[in-house]
Each structure stands twice: as C-alpha cells, then as structure tokens.
Image (cartoon, coloured by chain):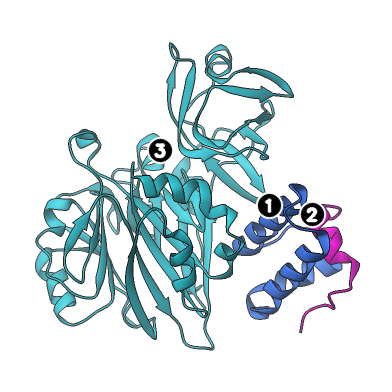
Amino acid sequence: MIPNIRRHEWKDLLSGTINPKLNSLSLKLKLNNLRMGVRTKKMTVDEAVQEIHSYCASNTKMYSKDLKTIFQH
Amino acid sequence: MNIQNKLCTVEQTNELIRGGNTLIIAGDERVLEQLESGNWIGGTIPYFMSEEGGCMTQEKVFVTDLTDFVQSAKIATYGAAEIEQMLDDRFRNGFSYLLIPAFSEIHSKYALEANNHSSLFDIPTMGWITGVDLEEIGSRTPKIVDGRSAQMSDSIMIALHCELAEEQFAEIDIINLFEQGEHDLLEFKEDGFSATDCMVNGKEMNFADYVNDNEIDIRLPLVADYSGAFINTSFQQIDTAGKKVDFYAPVLKNYEYRVAKPVGDYVKEFNAMIPVEGNGLICSCNCILNYLYSELEGKQTGNVTGPITFGEIAYVLVNQTMVTLAIN
C-alpha cells in the first residue's frame, strides 16, 4: 500500500522542495528523469506525480524503505 | 544454490554450455572463439576481478551462470536504431543484461539517448561496454557474441532478457567512490562525448583551457548528481591544440558537474562500501579506469568478482563505477 497520490509530498519530491536521502538507485534515476522532464517542460508536475506514484506502486516491496523516508520527511 | 561467477577454462565453460545453462561470458576474443554455441551471450574483455584479485588473462573466460536464478531467458540483438525495441522486449518481472561494443554507433546512441526513455527505469537493466587488451586498441575492435550461433559483432548490442518468479525482484546498484568535489560548477551547452566550451560558475570558457589552467587531475571523473545518485563521466583525453576534451561517457546539458574529490586508498574505501554477504548479490562489473588508476592488479575488491570493462551500464552508461545485480 503506498501513500495516496494526493499527498503533497509527491509534488514536493518532484519539485525538489524535499530531497530525502533515498536508497534505491532505480528510484533516484526515475525521480531524476521525471524532475528533468518537468524542468524541460516535457511533462507537467501532475503527469510526473502520476508516473512516480505508479512506479512506486509497481514494486512496493523494493521501494517500501524509501517511501517511509519520503513520507516521514 | 551454486552460482558460477568466476574464471573458467574453455573446457569448463563448454561443459556448462552443453548443459544448456544460461550464461554471460566475458573474455578475450581469441578465447571466446573457442566456445560452442548455446544459451549464452558474450563480450570481449581480457581484464577481470577474480577470486585471487585483479588480473588480465587471454586463456580463461569469466562465466556468470544465471541458470538457477531465472525462470526463463531470451537472447536478442539490436542495432543502433532499436534501443526502444530492446526496452519493450524486457520481461515485466525480470531484468535485462546488455553487452555493447565500445566505440560503436550503438555505444554512442545508448549513452546519449537511453536516459530520455522514461521506461528505461521500469525494469532493472545492467550490463557493460565490451573492450580489448589496451595494447590492441585501434588494431582489434571490441565485440559482443551471440552465443546461439557463436557469431561475433562489433556493431550491435546483445541482450539477455531474464524473467524472474513472481515473488522475486531484481535490484541494480552502483558502488561509486567518487563524490562531487568542492571545485567549480561546470555545465555544458550540448550533449556529447566531447566538449569545447563550458560554463564555469556561469561564465563561458574553453573547457580544455580550464582543465589545463587549473591542473585538473583527469584521473578524477566529472560527477553529476542524479537526484542522489552520483554518476561519473570520465576524461579520455585533453586535446590542447584542438581545444577539445573527450570523455568516455557523454556530458549532458541541463546537468551540473563538478570534478570529483580524490579517493585515498581505493581498495580500503571500496571494501567499506561493498554489499554484505547474503544480500542476494549475483554479479557485478567494474571499470577499467578503476583497475588502472587504483592499481587493482593482484588486489581484491572484497568478495565481489566480475569483468573489468570499458564502461558500465546501470540503466544509464556510467564510468569508473562498480555495478551490481541482486535478486531478492
């Protein structure tokens, strides 16, 4: 179970407002790719939130530790 | 569970091949030529981190046997225009292992374009850039081997797409001793394996001049921060007359680079960072520049073994980095 997509932390993460120390390489790289996409206007923040939420939901086991870090930040 | 992840003779390897094992094989081209066809992919490189330490051999090959770890596997080759196809061919629950010949068009294309595909990060994708004996650069080309036919190529990428059981997942990680130093902030106007001009703390100047004037140690890579993942771009050479700097991976616009902090004792610092036993580590690769600059011949990097390569793939192309694959 991952935090609701409406939680503000998702947008904060993508905008760089929060920069928690993540463990998973794949999540760091995916996050970076999405941040760059927003920054270069290839996607909106909402689209990026949708994508990273789905990404984390696809493997909650792998990302559980990082999700705790993000949502305790 | 018996993971074969070590140097083997041709005879030992052919026995594994005849047994139908799913293998990744690294070795000098002249040794790989002696292997029978079967369910394997191969890449040329004669440098390895073995159980006895770093070494160069043109008599043995390094074998990673995935047979007991994967539910199924498929081999496929791709040309320079087929990176997206490779991404689509990956198993939803699995991982893919890529081998790409150094100095090929697909090497450049993968390095420059893979990062633009958001789906790249959806499925664990690792691998390495194949190479040659350093003294043979220019006279022999790096190659991949399609084990199904035992045919070699210096212009295509080969992938071993592996499927895992539903309850398992693969995880790729990097061990990178290099951190961004306190040097100037460097930004490049264009993506590329070479650079002429650069923005240094916001001011434009020629990058070759900057490196020379500041006596930058080019054994240290440039480091960019990918949202907490430190990714290296290694210097290849400074063309002072041509005012150009060449790299072993591309610098990318929109990224901020700094020259890395020096590393003291590579082996000691590396050993402090390697994964502990029992964490599901299956295989790894490490960079030829680490082997050379840190004088790893005869030295061990903990119990982590694997080929020493001309570039590493941890989703994206990285330099001077160890890449590891674990199955949990």
Q: Tell me the amino acid under the disc marked 1.
A: Gly
Distance CA(mark 2)–CA(mark 3): 32 Å
**Cβ atoms at labels 2 and 1 below 8 Å apart:** yes
Which is in the foreground here, disc 2 or disc 3? Answer: 2
Q: Which residue is mark 1?
A: B228
Distance CA(mark 3)–CA(mark 1): 25 Å
Distance CA(mark 2)–CA(mark 1): 8 Å
Figure chain in cyan: B
B153 with respect to B162 (left or right): left
Nearer-the-camera pick, B53 or B74: B74
The extreme front residue here reads B81
Compared with residue B69, is residue B276 higher up or lower down, i.e. above or below? above
Is residue B59 visible in the rendered structure shown here? no
Q: Earlier in the sequence, mark 3 or mark 1?
A: 1
Residue bounds of the magenta highlight? A1-18
Q: Tell me the amino acid under the disc marked 2.
A: Asn
Which is in the foreground here, disc 3 or disc 1? Answer: 1
Question: Dot 2, how many residues are within 10 Å of its Cα: few (below 14), some (14-19), or many (20+)?
Answer: some
Element at badge 3? Answer: loop
Looking at the picture, do discs 2 and 3 lie on one chain?
no
Q: Tell me the amino acid under the disc marked 3.
A: Ser
Chain A color in figure: blue
Q: Which residue is mark 2?
A: A19
Q: Residue at x 25, y 36 (%)?
A: B134
Nearer-the-camera pick, A42 or B46: A42
Compared with residue B148, is residue B43 higher up or lower down, i.e. above or below? above
B205 with respect to B287 (left or right): right
B215 with respect to B296 (left or right): right
Displayed quadrant of residue A73: bottom right
Q: Chain of mark 2?
A: A
Q: Which residue is mark 3?
A: B294
